[in-house]
């Protein structure tokens, strides 16, 4: 477990951006491929459609686009960026996709690396970036959550294929000794329960030379025990968020927005009802994008900032959860220009 002790982080949220692919696949279209229908998907998940990256576009394009918009909102010269973290489980290059984004942005003074924590990835990356900023070693960071789960979904498995989509979101955060934008956070992992949601390598060994084999680099499609994941989320998210609120002596009535990983509307509703948070304070856009993994939180944040639901000074209670198992929560003030 990792958590900060109090409001000393000294970072400000000053920009956000997002990007999604143009191709929309709705529930009826999926029903033409697998034995499912709009009614089943909507009632069990809240999802109506999702976006899928097609030819002539890439995850790096989306992530770069989202990051550029965040940098523009923050009004930063890209040469002043010190750090770029790309949270993703679906890199284009297993050696890392973040450096290509750094190059696309022209952020030649930034160090850039990938971080993998599945659907908790954005939150884990945000907290990681905050450590560099709070320590004084860096001043400006871009944190990106981007995933292309469409390439790892088994599109013939109705139990999983209806849930996921592609997208990217980003935030610009900077060190600010006079601000406590990130009030607190808590991150957790439990590998002993990791078997209920995996994107695992295949175990294929081929002959190398006489007497030796090598493992072929290949991954299996996403495999999930939906009920177990559901139970995990509705149990652990209220606990971690409740403990964080208690620790910082914040009443749930003070929360302006509940911003959860967009996996399933029923999970969002269950967590909101546990804290008696009214539905108009629960941010949700999964209807249009499905679960975009590390992208859901910044994608939702960006939408709500740009349509002026979230205003400067609003308090946001955020939680991400997913494979690993991994989960986390953060409380922060939005201080962007909108
Ligand atoms: N369309 C139609 N029927 C479907 C279906 C689909 N897309 N997917 C499953 N079903 C069927 C099942 O085959 C099962 O039929 P059976 O009773 O004849 O065997 C029935 O619906 C119930 O399946 P079940 O898996 O018990 O449904 P559920 O109520 O648990 O809902 C999820 C399934 C996936 C929507 C739900 O478990 C869930 O949201 N889990 C969390 C998943 C998640 O968020 N993962 C990512 C976390 S980061």
Image (cartoon, helix red, strand yellow):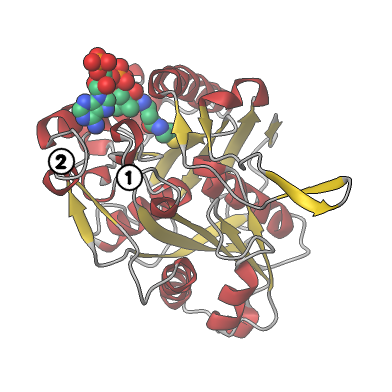
Q: Is residue 32 above or below residue 160?
A: below
The outermost residue toward the right is 211
* Front one among 330 and 64: 64
Residue in the image at 14% along x and 49% along y: 29
Q: Position of residue 69 (x, y in %)?
A: 41, 73
Q: Which residue is mark 1?
A: 155
Looking at the image, residue 57 sits to the left or right of residue 134; the answer is: left
Looking at the image, residue 282 sits to the left or right of residue 27; the answer is: right
* Secondary element at image label 1: loop
Q: Position of residue 138 (x, y in %)?
A: 73, 66
Q: CA distance from mark 2 to mark 1?
A: 11 Å
* Front one among 330 and 203: 203
Mark 2 CB within 8 Å of ligand 1: no
Residue in the image at 35% along x and 17% along y: 274
Q: Which residue is mark 2?
A: 31
The quadrant in which residue 158 appears is: top left
Quadrant for ligand 1 reads top left
User: Can you see residue 56?
Assistant: yes
Q: Mark 1 or mark 2, which is nearer the start of the sequence?
A: 2
The quadrant in which residue 72 appears is: bottom left
Residue in the image at 49% along x and 27% along y: 241
């Amino acid at each position: 477990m990792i958590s900060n002790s109090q409001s000393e982080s000294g970072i400000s949220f000053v920009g956000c951006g997002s990007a999604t692919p143009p191709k929309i696949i709705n529930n009826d279209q999926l029903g033409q491929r697998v034995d499912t229908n709009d009614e089943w998907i909507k009632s069990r998940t809240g999802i109506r459609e999702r976006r899928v990256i097609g030819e002539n576009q890439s995850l790096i394009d989306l992530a770069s686009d989202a990051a550029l918009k965040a940098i523009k909102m923050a009004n930063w010269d890209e040469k002043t960026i010190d750090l770029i973290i790309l949270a993703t489980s679906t890199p284009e290059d297993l050696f890392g996709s973040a450096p290509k984004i750094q190059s696309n942005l022209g952020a030649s003074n930034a160090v850039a690396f990938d971080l993998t924590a599945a659907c908790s990835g954005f939150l884990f990356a945000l907290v990681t970036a905050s450590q560099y900023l709070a320590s004084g070693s860096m001043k400006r960071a871009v944190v990106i959550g981007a995933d292309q789960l469409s390439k790892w979904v088994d599109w013939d498995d109705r139990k999983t294929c209806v849930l996921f989509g592609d997208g990217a979101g980003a935030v610009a955060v900077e060190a600010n000794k006079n601000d406590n934008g990130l009030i607190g956070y808590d991150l957790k992992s439990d590998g002993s329960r990791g078997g209920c949601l995996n994107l695992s390598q295949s175990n294929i060994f081929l002959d190398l030379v006489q007497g030796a084999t090598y493992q072929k680099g290949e991954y299996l499609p996403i495999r999930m025990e939906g009920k177990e994941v559901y139970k995990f989320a509705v149990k652990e998210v209220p606990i971690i968020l409740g403990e964080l609120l208690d620790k910082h002596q914040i009443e749930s009535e003070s929360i302006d927005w509940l911003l959860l990983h967009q996996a399933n509307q029923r999970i969002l509703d269950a967590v909101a009802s546990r804290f008696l948070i009214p539905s108009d304070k629960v941010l949700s856009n999964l209807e249009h994008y499905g679960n975009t993994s590390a992208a859901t939180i910044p994608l939702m944040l960006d939408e709500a900032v740009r349509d002026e639901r979230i205003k400067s000074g609003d308090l946001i209670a955020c939680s991400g959860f997913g494979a690993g198992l991994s989960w986390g929560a953060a409380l922060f003030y939005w201080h962007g220009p909108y």
